[in-house]
């Protein structure tokens, strides 16, 4: 017991020990921040590609297929949380005054799409998620009046619709503030409210025959009813959302059924479930022939090559940073070694008294090992507190550093996401805490052995 008492006494009265505690705390803080940020970034990436592609993507290559009914059937099956529909194309969007943007066109079923929190939370107007994906009456009348004035005649059924309702990503309607990396959402909503003429989508289809290849151009009028910021930069910069049925019909594009399983169901388990559910739906429910099964294809989103490549590279960078932090821990261990060795040399009298009073070499060694462990435990606890606080408040710290340095550190255009991941990677805390304590123990090992080998006659000779 006296060994622990002396170790605590040395720790409290020797201010130089604060440097050792600080070095351990610094290592722990850096490891928590780096590990949490990298793993949080991967979690964000996983969250957003699952939003864009679903947990499992089901492609059925058949025109005039009732995808809405298929989605309702799949959602009724056990193990499936929700299903969304997606149809993608591309084109040029003419807004006004020569403002032409290349856009990704996504056909969505608004009711199904709002089940994804990234989409529903990203809508600037809360009313959009509650209503149908059509133009409000006042905007429809304005669009028809504009078209009638443009054509200089009364509208005929072939002229309608005057405009299709659309939802634009915030990057199409506003510029990001370079200092805050934020969009002026109020100004964007005001612009939509005061919208006075349709926007135009220029696109086309390629029709191939044995004689020739024709390109049929299309000019589609659309009218924004809302804007959205999902937090994913590549979606927010240039994405135009149109009604799902309209995109499938007018753009002649394929449709994807995006399936997300209930919590705890893995990608492979969900894929296996769909391999049994989908043929049953096509053959038994719809009464199609077995040959129709060949038009369907399942793909697990997380196993797409570009996703695997990205996550693999991020994990490599995380491993590299952890190796670098390992060297920082070695430096901390050397600092602890020097500090404890100095204390051993200054406490030779105490060592001699302990040995002369019958204390063994192991008792003396345990005294300084306890001292090192107390440094490690104190530094680890301090590091855990500071590290967890830093990750939870990483945006405040980033804003402070950005203001101090004069430029924005985290930009959505560079990192792909507007949000900085601020959640703790809990599985890593145990080994980080262990590393902090072991670092201090290793630094104290050699000084403890040195102290244990001191002979009482030599230590007390000049005291």
Image (spheres, rainbow, N blue to C red):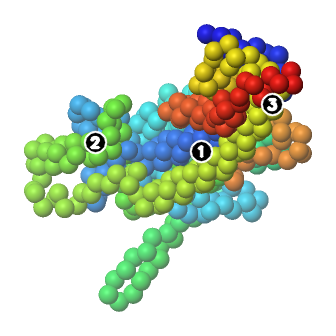
In the structure shown, which secondary structural element does the residue marked by tag 2 occupy?
helix
In the structure shown, which secondary structural element does the residue marked by tag 1 occupy?
helix
Q: Is residue 376 above or below residue 253?
A: above
Q: CA distance from mark 2 to mark 1?
A: 27 Å
- Quadrant of the snapshot with the N terminus: top right
Q: Is residue 262 above or below residue 250?
A: above
> Which tag is nearer the camera, tag 2 or tag 1?
1
**What x and y, as percent, mark residue 386?**
71, 26
Q: CA distance from mark 2 to mark 3?
A: 65 Å
Q: Residue at x 61, y 54 (%)?
A: 320
Q: Are marks 2 and 1 in contact (CB under 8 Å)?
A: no
Q: Are marks 3 and 1 in contact (CB under 8 Å)?
A: no
Q: CA distance from mark 3 to mark 1?
A: 43 Å
Q: Residue at x 80, y 22 (%)?
A: 460
Give the camera-side residue of 36 and 447. Answer: 447
Q: Which residue is mark 2?
A: 270
Q: Which residue is mark 1?
A: 38
Residue 345 — which label?
A: 3
Circle 1: is it few (<14), some (14-19), or many (20+) Cα within 10 Å? some
Give the camera-side residue of 63 and 338. Answer: 338
Q: Quadrant of residue 410?
A: top right
């Amino acid at each position: 017991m006296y060994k622990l008492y002396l170790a605590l006494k040395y720790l409290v009265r020797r201010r130089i020990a604060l440097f050792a505690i600080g070095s351990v705390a610094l290592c722990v803080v850096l490891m928590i921040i780096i590990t949490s940020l990298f793993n949080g970034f991967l979690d964000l990436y996983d969250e957003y590609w699952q939003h864009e592609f679903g947990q499992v993507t089901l492609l059925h290559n058949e025109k005039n297929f009732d995808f809405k009914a298929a989605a309702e059937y799949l959602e009724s099956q056990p193990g499936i949380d929700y299903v969304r529909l997606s149809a993608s194309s591309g084109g040029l969007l003419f807004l006004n005054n020569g403002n032409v943007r290349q856009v990704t066109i996504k056909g969505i079923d608004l009711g199904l799409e709002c089940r994804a929190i990234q989409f529903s939370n990203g809508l600037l107007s809360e009313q959009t998620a509650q209503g149908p994906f059509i133009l409000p009456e006042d905007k429809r009348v304005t669009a028809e009046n504009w078209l009638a004035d443009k054509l200089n005649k009364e509208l005929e059924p072939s002229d309608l619709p005057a405009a299709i309702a659309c939802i634009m990503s915030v990057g199409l309607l506003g510029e990001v503030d370079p200092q805050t990396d934020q969009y002026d959402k109020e100004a964007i909503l005001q612009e939509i409210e005061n919208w006075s003429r349709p926007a135009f989508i220029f696109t086309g289809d390629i029709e191939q025959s044995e004689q020739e290849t024709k390109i049929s151009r299309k000019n589609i009028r659309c009218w924004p009813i809302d804007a959205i910021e999902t937090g994913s930069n590549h979606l927010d910069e240039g994405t135009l959302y149109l009604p799902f049925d309209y995109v499938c019909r007018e753009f002649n594009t394929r449709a994807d059924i995006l399936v997300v399983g209930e919590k705890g169901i893995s990608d492979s388990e969900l894929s296996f479930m769909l391999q049994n559910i989908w043929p049953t739906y096509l053959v038994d429910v719809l009464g199609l022939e077995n040959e129709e099964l060949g038009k369907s294809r399942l793909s697990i989103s997380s196993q797409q090559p570009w996703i695997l490549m990205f996550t693999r590279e991020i994990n490599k960078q995380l491993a590299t940073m952890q190796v670098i932090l390992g060297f920082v821990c070695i430096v901390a261990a050397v600092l602890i070694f020097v500090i404890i060795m100095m204390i051993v040399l200054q406490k030779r009298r105490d060592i001699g008294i302990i040995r002369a009073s019958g204390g063994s070499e192991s008792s003396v060694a345990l005294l300084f090992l306890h001292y090192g462990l107390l440094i490690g435990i104190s530094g680890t606890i301090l590091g855990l507190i500071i590290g967890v606080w830093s990750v939870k408040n990483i945006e405040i710290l980033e804003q402070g550093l950005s203001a101090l340095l004069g430029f924005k550190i985290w930009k959505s255009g560079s990192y792909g996401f507007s949000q900085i991941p601020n959640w703790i990677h809990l599985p890593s805390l145990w080994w980080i805490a262990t590393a902090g304590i072991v670092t201090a123990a290793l630094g104290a090992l050699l000084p403890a052995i040195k102290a244990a080998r001191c002979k009482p006659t030599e230590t007390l000779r000049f005291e």
